[in-house]
Image (spheres, helix red, strand yellow):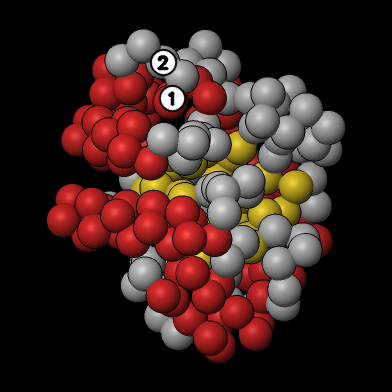
Amino acid sequence: MRGLYAITPECADSEALVERVAAAIGAGIAALQYRAKSAPPARRRQEAAALARLCERAGVPLIVNDDLELALEVNAAGVHLGKDDGDFAAARARIGSRLLGVSCYDSLERARAAARAGADYVAFGSVFPSPTKPDAVRAPLALFGQARALGLPLVAIGGITLENAPQVIAAGADCLAVITDLFDAPDVAARARDYARLFQHALQQ
């Protein structure tokens, strides 16, 4: 995994959500996470299924946030778990070879535990103040260098924009998880391409 890790915004209009995600996928993203904290269960199932079909056609992994059962129901590529979403090892056993991502906030020890339990990637953040989670713990960029020894892809999340993204990539993040700066952009596809160019530039340096 390397590149833009798009995370869906809260959106009451399912059709508009799918259209915006399709634009991002068409412009090139590394992965998509379906995150819908406030949506009712029926709408979550409908949206997750639609996004699963879209991602499968495009060859982009769909990862469901904090809902292992929904991930299995829509045959998603994986699930992402936070601190209140259950045991890593139990989730690993349930999902088999699907992707398992774990939020590690500012904790290198939690990342080590996730790696031991079979996580496929770990996420640190919020790396900057986040409009989505204004009270989130802040994770120093130095964590990415420290976590490199885990041998797992490292995802950065929280307050990431095109302007501050280069320093996160330089710190060692393999993926940038972005919600607001991507999906609130006037042109979602153009913004996704801008992020892709940041990673291409980093590889050339």
x 36%, y 11%: residue: 186
Above or below, 80 relative to 115: above
Q: Secondary structure at mark 2?
A: loop
Q: How many marks?
A: 2
- Relative to the observer, which residue lies in front, 37 or 133? 37
Which amino acid is tagged 2? Ala
**Residue that protrudes farthest toward the bottom in the picture:** 93
**Image vertical order of residue 59 relative to residue 159, above or below:** below
- Rendered view: 123 above or below 116: above
Would residue 180 appear left or right of 198 to someone viewing this image?
A: right
184 to the left or right of 21: right
Q: Quadrant of residue 48?
A: bottom left
Instruction: Say whether marks 1 and 2 touch (CB < 8 Å).
Output: yes
**Is residue 20 shown to the viewer in this render?**
yes
- Residue 102: mark in rendering: none
Residue under the point 52% across and 11% down: 163
Viewer can see residue 100: no
Residue 103 found in image quarter? bottom right
Residue type at mark 1: give it. Answer: Leu
Residue labelled with disc 2 = 185
Query: How far is mark 1 from mark 2, CA to CA?
Result: 5 Å
The crowd level at tag 2 (other Cα within 10 Å; few <14, some 14-19, many 20+) is few
119 or 79, which lies in front?
79
Q: Which residue is mark 1?
A: 182
> How far across and down, in percent of the image, does residue 165 sit?
52, 22
In the depicted structure, whether residue 140 falls above or below residue 101? above
Left/right placement of residue 160 relative to residue 44 reads right
Question: Where does the C terminus fall, quadrant-wise?
Answer: top left
Residue at point 63%, 46% (across, down): 38
Residue 178's spot in the image, x, y percent? Answer: 51, 32
Q: Residues within 10 Å of mark 1 (few under 14, many from 20)?
A: many
Q: Which of the pair 105/182 is nearer the observer?
A: 182
